[in-house]
Image: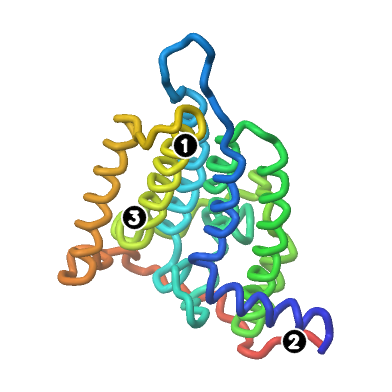
Amino acid sequence: MALYEEFVRSGRWLYQRRGFLPLVGVALLFTQVASVAIPGEPPAVPLTWPLLCFGISLVGLALRSYTVGCAAPDTSGRGRTAQVAAALNTSGMYSVVRHPLYLGNCISWLGPALVPQRPWPAVVLGFAFWLYYERIMLHEEEFLRGRYGQAFLDWAARTPTFLPDVRLWSPPNAPFNVWAVLRQEYSGLLALVLIFAALNVAQWWVSFHRWKLDPFWAGALVVGVLVATVLRVLRRLTDLLEDRDSAPAGVRWENEMAGPTKSDRP
């Protein structure tokens, strides 16, 4: 099997497991948590640095949310078993970078990686995530190339893979769809809150041998769980989170972007 096909095949395997495999890397961060105890000072875990890291993660989540909110229906989803692309997204965030969702993921995971205040975990995890997402991106692009042919090739030729070029910005084709964001992104917010709360507990244990969670993270955890629970119940039992007028009249998502259905790669 040629190396390209091998990368695509491994990307398909990683794509189907991309929801939990990154957690393996995050788990390694807990081995790097160092003591924050200051001799002679009362026991306390500083919140300033973790909150700054949490803010970095929220930037990544915001990038994901904006991308999902402006994407065409039945695209940019969280599916695991198979690719779905009812249209080729080329506007909004997809006009400046081909994989804005994975860029958002990397920014989100950078936050926890910086909490231990040691440079090498962020560097190692960044390199591992690049290898990980590189293969997933190859798999996704092979699917899009086979589905949209020359339209995909033209878009890929002018759009960077992972580092955005803001000079290429083109406004999204549709208004922001808050229902899609509420439907898809609540789990990402809950995961971030859980990770940062767990890191706070780890810092208390390593520093003072106490099982403790600071009130801020305890409150954030309660709010995160409640919001995620409510949205999950609404998604499972009602249609309140279904799209409502997500595409304005006259917009056809596949119009000029529908190309040949068979890949022209040799």
Q: Is residue 194 above or below residue 48?
A: below
At x 44%, y 32%, the residue is: 209
At x 62%, y 79%, the residue is: 12
The spot of residue 241 in percent (x, y) is 23, 63
Residue under pointer 3:
186
The spot of residue 170 in percent (x, y) is 56, 52
Mark 3: which secondary structure?
A: helix
At x 55%, y 45%, the residue is: 30
Residue that extends furthest to the front in the rendered view of this protein: 209
Q: Is residue 114 above or below residue 154?
A: above
| Tag of residue 104 | none
Number of numbered discs visible in the structure rendering: 3
Task: Identify which amino acid the numbered label 3 is placed on.
Answer: Tyr
In-front residue for pair 17/150: 17
Mark 1 Cα shell of 10 Å, populated few (<14), some (14-19), many (≥20) = many
Looking at the image, is mark 2 or mark 1 nearer the viewer? Answer: 1
At x 55%, y 48%, the residue is: 109
Q: How is the image coloured?
A: rainbow
Residue 79 location, quadrant: bottom left
The spot of residue 256 in percent (x, y) is 55, 75
Q: Earlier in the sequence, mark 2 or mark 1?
A: 1
Mark 2 Cα shell of 10 Å, populated few (<14), some (14-19), many (≥20) = few
Task: Identify which amino acid the numbered label 2 is placed on.
Answer: Asp
Q: Are marks 2 and 1 in contact (CB under 8 Å)?
A: no
Residue under pointer 1:
54
Residue under pointer 2:
264
Q: Earlier in the sequence, mark 3 or mark 2?
A: 3
Q: Is residue 59 left or right of residue 13?
A: left
Looking at the image, is mark 3 or mark 2 nearer the viewer? Answer: 3
The spot of residue 226 in percent (x, y) is 22, 50
Mark 2: which secondary structure?
A: loop
